[in-house]
Amino acid sequence: MAESKEEVSFEEAMKNLEELVEKLEAGDVPLEKAIQYYQEGMKLSKICNEKLVHVEGQMQKIMNEHGEFEPFSVQEEE
């Protein structure tokens, strides 16, 4: 995984994580490679979790406590 977490989309991270899981589930991976896959999978899992938490925070800002959308304005960062 050469890309930084900012460059990897949620979908890419999930796809890569699923591929690693498939390799590990196949069971014919040498121990050293399995450990490497596991470590990479944990990094991908963390990226996915951080992205989901970020999106959840954005949605909470958009929706009120009744589940209805509130008007909002976009403010550009300076």
Image (spheres, rainbow, N blue to C red):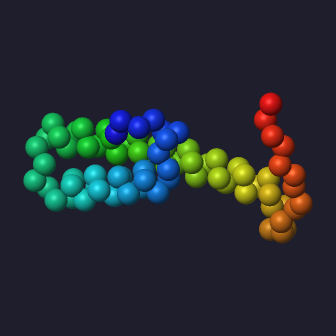
Q: Is 46 left, or right, of 16 in this rendering?
A: right
**Residue at 22%, 39% in the rendered image:** 35
Which part of the image, by quadrant, shows the N terminus?
Answer: top left
**Residue at 10%, 53% in the rendered image:** 28
**Which of the two residues, 12 or 31, is positioned nearer the viewer here?**
12
Q: Whole-percent x and y of residue 77? A: 78, 35
Q: Is 78 left, or right, of 2 in this rendering?
A: right
**Residue at 42%, 50% in the rendered image:** 13
Q: Whole-percent x and y of residue 3? A: 41, 37
Rendering quarter of residue 25: bottom left
**Which of the two residues, 5 or 34, is positioned nearer the viewer here?**
5
Which part of the image, by quadrant, shows the C terminus?
Answer: top right
Q: Whole-percent x and y of residue 19? A: 29, 56
Q: Is residue 7 above or below residue 12?
A: above
**Residue at 47%, 57% in the rendered image:** 11
Viewer can see residue 50: yes
Rendering quarter of residue 42: top left
Q: Residue furthest top?
A: 78
Q: Is 41 left, or right, of 53 in this rendering?
A: left
Q: Is residue 77 above or below residue 13?
A: above
Q: Is residue 53 above or below residue 69?
A: above
**Which of the two residues, 25 or 54, is positioned nearer the viewer here?**
54
